[in-house]
Amino acid sequence: MVQKTEKQKMLAGELYLADDPELVADQKRASRLLGMYNATTVEQLEQRQQILQELFFQVGEKLTIVPPLHCDYGSNISIGNGTYMNYGCVILDCNQVEIGENVLFAPYVQIYAAYHPTEPEIRLTGRELAAPIKIGNNVWIGGGAIICPGVTIGDNTTIGAGSVVVKDIPANVVAVGNPCRIIRYLS
């Protein structure tokens, strides 16, 4: 039986070691590309697009991300056409992060696929966990919102500023708060 690599474990949602040499090399690659991206100016839109195409797994057309941007690997992120991400967004992409088309991110949105075991004895081994995140099409996420591991947000949904999304939010709703909850259904 072939043993899984730490990267394979990470992407499978199993306990993994983030200090594995392959993962460290992937993080260094992302750090280098993010440094280049975050140093660009508004006049360098073509260069920004080229860097994002190298950084991310999949990049849609008419994508705008206002620096600074931070992520772990980049290679686990897919972003659809027409998406806009404002200043200071963070994506901990230790698992797949799928962002649909025409998604709007206000400043300082945080997307966390990564998490740690709650059992202290396991946490002390240095092993970590990650769960995929999916954000549908035509979603608006308000400033400072936090999207937690394993969450799916449905199409056409609005997440209020400062919300902490700890469980799935369906399509066609407005949801706010900590924890985030539905306050209105859209027709």
Image (spheres, rainbow, N blue to C red):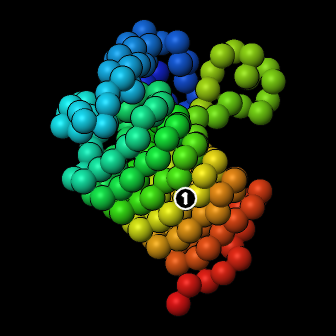
- Above or below, 35 against 142 in this view is above
- Above or below, 75 against 78 in this view is above
The quadrant of the picture occupied by the N terminus is: top left
Q: Residue at x 53, y 19 (%)?
A: 18
**Camera sees residue 17:** yes
The quadrant in which residue 176 appears is: bottom right
Residue 53 on image: x %, y %: 23, 36
- Above or below, 170 against 73 in this view is below
Residue 84 on image: x %, y %: 39, 53
Q: Residue at x 66, y 81 (%)?
A: 184
Q: Residue furthest top?
A: 21
Q: Amino acid at mark 1?
A: Ile
Residue 45 on image: x %, y %: 23, 39
Q: Is residue 19 left or right of residue 174?
A: left
Q: Residue furthest right?
A: 120
Residue toward you, 130 or 39: 39
Q: Residue furthest front?
A: 43
Q: Residue at x 66, y 69 (%)?
A: 175
Asked which secondary structure carries label 1, the reply is strand
Q: Is residue 155 left or right of residue 78?
A: right
**Camera sees residue 5:** no
The residue indicated by pointer 1 is: 141
Q: Residue at x 73, y 22 (%)?
A: 123
Residue toward you, 183 or 49: 49
Counting every numbered tag in the picture gives: 1
For label 1, the crowd category at 10 Å Cα-Cα, with few meaning under 14, some 14 to 19 and many 20 or more, is many
